[in-house]
Amino acid sequence: MIEKRLLEELLDIAVSTGADFAEVFAEREHTEQIRLMEGKVESVKDHFLAGVGIRAFCGTKTYYASTADLTPAGLRACAATVAGALGEKSPFAHAVSLTPDALPKDTVQTFPADAETARKAEILREAGAGAYAVSDKIRQVVGTYVDVDRTFLVANTAGLCREGRKVRTRLAMQAMAANGEDTQSGFCGPGSGVGMEFFERISPRAVGEKAAREALVNLSAAYCPAGTMTVAIENGFGGVIFHEACGHSLEATSVGIGASEMAGKQGTLIANPKVTAVDDGTLPGAWGSIPMDDEGNAPRRTVLIENGVLKNYMIDRLGSRRMGMPMTGSSRRQDYRYEPTSRMTNTFIENGPDRNEDIIASMEYGLYAKSMGGGSVDPLTGAFNFSVREGYIVRNGKICEPVRGASLIGTGTEILKNIDMVGQNLETAEGMCGSSSGSIPTNVGQPLIRVAKITVGGR
């Protein structure tokens, strides 16, 4: 992407005023997005992004600049901006010498760029037709197809020079159901870190059908009662609870500055011993997997919590300096315009010892959260609030009538200790995670779990 000699020159410039480390991050990204509205293609958008970000370290202080001017002069000016931010010029510590190498790449059978846009639009139409066919109460269907092909390069003053490539595809459908008095929605949005072969593994029609059925369930549902109760949270996107309520509190972004409820708790029991949680950026073809992180480090499997004990944090280079702990291949950013920080990849609770049927059977009264929606969390306190997209009341060990409008409210420390049953049907699901370094693709996941006690918001 950038010739080796110019990369070395840019790094030399960046450290010319006293920095102890510098890196260059370059990327090219192509995104195609198609939007379907009521069975018709509404828009087709091609988006190309290219640019470079340059960062310098001085202890635990960082200086960052980015540019879309990819001429040698533009890149030199960007490096000079970073160097100038450090202050007065001092002699070079040494001349940078890069050694290019490569990490294993994901296997992509059919790159999205090699597929016709017409085929991608047909995938959307198939999904939309599936949603409308479920019921005449489905009044509106909105769908989005997106593929992303990202190539990026990292070079630094330690001599590292690596290039990676990541492809992602996703199909997202939202269905609206109405009965003349009320309107409710349903959603289904599977994605993968592979090419067009993804649509040989899933049925677009089934994606639309699932979104429609969720909308119909909510249309017939009464409002969820409020109170403290036992809650069973289903697998897949149910893992958003751990991602938000606990995962962000385990990132060096907050831990490294003492702004996390999990700071200083490594080696202590923070969860029920049935809980083991992992962040793994190496899973083949997964939505959140990476060929390397955005600082050029190989991804890895990091056990965060093992049998209830906090084992590790997710640590980027700056977090490593602050915390005196090794990096975990967890540095990520939306694109070159953002300085990277520690982020999750594929984060999930492992299968546990309990049979799924026993989890529901154990509940005298409570809520079964079949599908979770979005939410928010404060990493410092761990306080979270999440919506339940599809929920049911459980009575005497049986899943009963559907309810809507439910939310789960609590803190990360509370929910970890109150997870008292962990099932055996681990699945992951795709999402986008927003934080200080922008919006990135992440996987969440878990088996069916039971939370003995949690506050449920409702009516």
Image: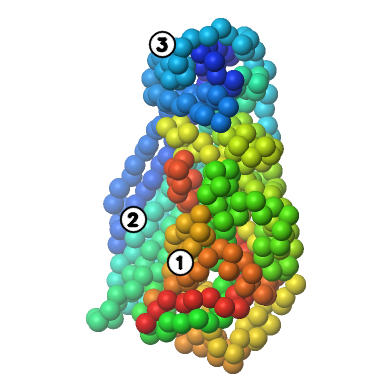
Image quarter for residue 30?
top left
Q: Are marks 3 and 2 in contact (CB under 8 Å)?
A: no
Q: Which mark is residue 73?
A: 3
Name the front one of labels 2 and 1: 1
Q: Residue furthest left?
A: 180
Residue 455 rendering spot, x and y as whole percentages: 49, 76
Answer above or below: position of 161 versus 323: above
Q: Which of disc 1 and disc 2 is earlier in sequence? A: 2
**Mark-to-mark CA distance, 3 and 1:** 48 Å
Q: Which mark is residue 200?
A: none
For this rendering, which residue is in front, 114 or 87? 87
Check disc 2 and give the amino acid type: Leu
Residue 105 rendering spot, x and y as whole percentages: 65, 36
Check disc 3 and give the amino acid type: Ala
Answer above or below: position of 304 versus 176: above
Check disc 1 and give the amino acid type: Phe
**Residue occupying image coordinates x 37% and y 36%:** 47
Q: Residues within 10 Å of mark 3 (few under 14, many from 20)?
A: few
For this rendering, which residue is in front, 205 or 337? 337
The residue singled out by tag 1 in the image is 386
The residue singled out by tag 2 in the image is 36
**Residue occupying image coordinates x 43% and y 69%:** 387
Name the front one of labels 3 and 2: 3
